[in-house]
Image (tube, grey):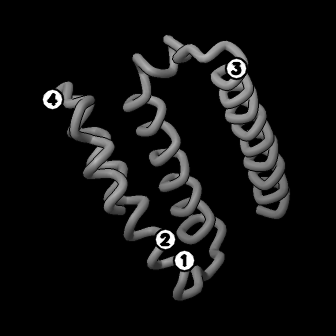
Amino acid sequence: MYEFTEFLNRLMAIMTIFGLLCAVFGIVYFLILKKKWKLVSENAVLLALIVSLSASIGSLIYSNYIGFEPCNLCWYQRIFIFSQVVLFAVALYIKDKKHIAAYSLTF
C-alpha cells in the first residue's frame, strides 16, 4: 500500500506541474498574440470536465482506498467539485457552451 501511495503522490505532483505549465503557457500565448487558443476554446467544457473528474477521483482514492480521513474543509471542497463534474457532464451532453460558465462560477 505504501508503494501505491508514493506512486500516486508523485503522479499527482507531475500532473499538477504539467497543468500549471500549460496554464502559464496559455496565458503568455494569449497575452503575446492577443488571440484565443482555438484548441482550448473549442474544448473548454471537456477540459473542465476532465479536471473536475480527476480531482473527484483523486480525492475518492485518497479517502476510500488509501484511508486518509478528509478534514471538514475538504468535505466542503468535495461538495463543490462533485457538483462541477455533474454540471460539466450535462453541459457537454446538451452542448451548452454559452451558459455553463455562469452555472460553474456559482460553485
Structural distance between the alpha carbons of marks 3 and 1: 34 Å
Q: Disc 4 or 1, which lies upstream in sequence?
A: 1
Please report contact status of discs 2 and 4: CB closer than 8 Å, yes or no.
no
| Residue at 56 percent of width and 62 percent of height | 59
Q: Residue at x 68, y 34 (%)?
A: 23
The residue mark sitting in front, 3 or 1, is 3
**Residue 70, position in %: x, y?**
58, 80
Name the amino acid, label 2: Gln
Residues under numbered marks 1 and 2 in contact, where contact means CB atoms less than 8 Å apart: yes
Q: Which residue is mark 3?
A: 29
Q: Secondary structure at mark 3?
A: helix
Task: Identify the residue position indicated by label 1 in the image.
Answer: 74
Q: Which mark is residue 94?
A: 4
Per the image, label 1 sits on a secondary structure element best described as helix
In this rendering, would 87 be left or right of 7?
Answer: left
What is the distance, in whole Å, between disc 3 and disc 4 at their CAs? Answer: 30 Å
Front of the two marks 2 and 3: 3
Residue flagged by tag 4: what amino acid is it? Ile
- Which residue in the protein does label 2 denote? 77
Q: Residue at x 67, y 30 (%)?
A: 27
> What type is the residue that disc 3 sits on?
Tyr
Mark 2 crowd level (few <14, some 14–19, many ≥20, 10 Å Cα): few
Please report whichever mark, 2 or 3, sits nearer to the chain's N-terminal start: 3
Q: Name the kind of residue labelled 1 in the image.
A: Cys
Q: Quarter of the image for the N terminus: give it.
A: bottom right
Residue 9 location (% of width, % of height): 79, 55
